[in-house]
């Protein structure tokens, strides 16, 4: 057994930027055919091109994880174009920051709808697809250390990621008899569009100084955990969370 994913098909949500883009490249480099999905489908063209340059195979599909029709559509297109999926990375996500006592209900709803309801719909449709094809697979939810530890100004985000970690465990238990593994990667601070502005602020700099390894992460720091959970080498792992944060959440 190895980290080789040749012959497998994977789907990555929110692949147009940041971690999702890196996940797609890593899976394709390991040999998987990859469906890359995002709302901004034009931003996926350069990713498909980059993967083709190392003889990888990728297709771009438009996806809004808050729209049930779009979620069904992405699974249908991926199956038609690539065959049965055995890996799905639930990566699409967003954050809205502000004082909790001032947060508008619409902002709360937007974050929960994307990060928790969207991830749930993607997992549900993927499991139906895998059960129908009868070959099992690996669902990898991208949570956050904010789902396990408290920080101010991100109440909806924290609740959505804590919910996603609980959902990971619940689905892992229910779908284990179908050969579907459900695990979560729990990243700490990795500089991408979602946090670049915050990390450059005074609060962000203070936070960075508290990370035991003395740095924020780069998307490549998640390559190993991703390949472990995507491949058969983690065949007996389900319902787990892999924290990748430079020791941040381990610190009192
Ligand atoms: P990012 O903003 O670059 O990526 C988020 C992606 O999700 C974007 O491509 C965005 O377009 C997509 N997205 C948002 N709403 C969507 C929707 N309704 N439908 C489809 N796609 C949608 O930020 P990132 O850091 O790459 O974040 C990726 C994931 O990693 C997110 O779930 C985020 O919460 C999680 N995460 C990031 C960090 C970090 O430090 N960067 C830490 C922990 C968790």
Image: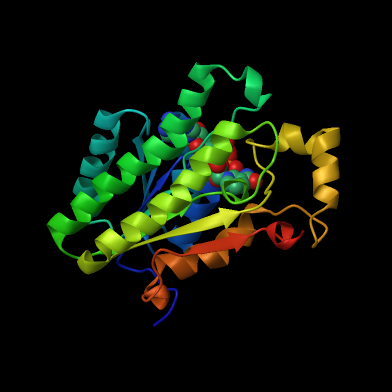
In the image, taking residue 248 as reference, residue 74 lies left or right, namely left
Quadrant in the picture for the N terminus: bottom left
Left or right: 100 with respect to 42?
right
Q: Nearer the viewer, residue 133 or 176?
A: 176
Image quadrant in which you'd find residue 168: bottom left
From the viewer's perspective, is residue 213 above or below residue 50? Answer: below
Q: Position of residue 173 (x, y in %)?
A: 31, 63
Taking 60 as reference, is 58 above or below it? below
Q: Residue at x 27, y 31 (%)?
A: 68
Q: State the image quarter where residue 242 is shown.
A: bottom right
Q: Quadrant of the C terminus?
A: bottom right
Whether residue 43 is visible: no
Relative to residue 55, is residue 126 drawn left or right? left
Above or below residue 41? Residue 232 is below
**Residue 105 visible (yes or no):** yes
Q: Position of residue 155 (x, y in %)?
A: 60, 33
The image's colour scheme reads rainbow
- Location of residue 177 in the rendering, given as x and y in whole percent from the top left corner: 22, 68
Count of number-bearing discs: 0
Q: Is residue 152 above or below residue 168?
A: above
| Nearer to the camera, 81 or 116 | 116
- Identified at 27% across, 56% down, the residue is 85
Query: Residue 47 placed where, x, y %?
Result: 49, 44
Residue under the image location 25 percent in, 43 percent down? 75
Residue occupying the point 41% across, 72% down:
237
Residue lying furthest front: 101
């Amino acid at each position: 057994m190895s980290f080789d994913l040749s012959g497998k098909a994977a789907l990555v949500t929110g692949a147009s930027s940041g971690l999702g883009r890196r996940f797609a490249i890593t899976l394709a480099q390991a040999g998987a055919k990859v469906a890359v999905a995002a709302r901004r489908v034009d931003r996926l063209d350069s990713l498909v091109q980059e993967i083709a340059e190392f003889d990888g195979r990728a297709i771009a599909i438009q996806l809004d994880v808050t729209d049930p029709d779009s979620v069904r559509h992405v699974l249908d297109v991926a199956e038609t174009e690539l065959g049965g999926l055995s890996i799905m990375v639930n990566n699409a996500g967003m954050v809205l920051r502000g004082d909790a006592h001032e947060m508008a209900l619409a902002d709360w709803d937007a974050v929960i709808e994307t990060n928790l309801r969207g991830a749930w719909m993607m997992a549900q449709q993927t499991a139906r697809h895998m059960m129908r094809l009868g070959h099992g697979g690996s669902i990898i939810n991208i949570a956050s250390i904010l789902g396990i530890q408290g920080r101010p100004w991100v109440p909806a985000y924290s609740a959505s990621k804590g919910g996603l970690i609980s959902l990971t465990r619940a689905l892992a238990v229910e779908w284990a008899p179908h050969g579907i593994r459900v695990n979560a990667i729990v990243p700490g601070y990795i500089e991408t569009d979602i946090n670049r502005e915050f990390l450059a602020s005074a609060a962000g700099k203070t936070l960075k100084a508290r990370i035991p390894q003395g740095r924020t992460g780069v998307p490549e720091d998640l390559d190993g955990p991703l390949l472990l959970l995507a491949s058969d080498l983690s065949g007996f792992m389900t319902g787990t969370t892999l924290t990748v944060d430079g020791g941040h959440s381990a610190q009192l």
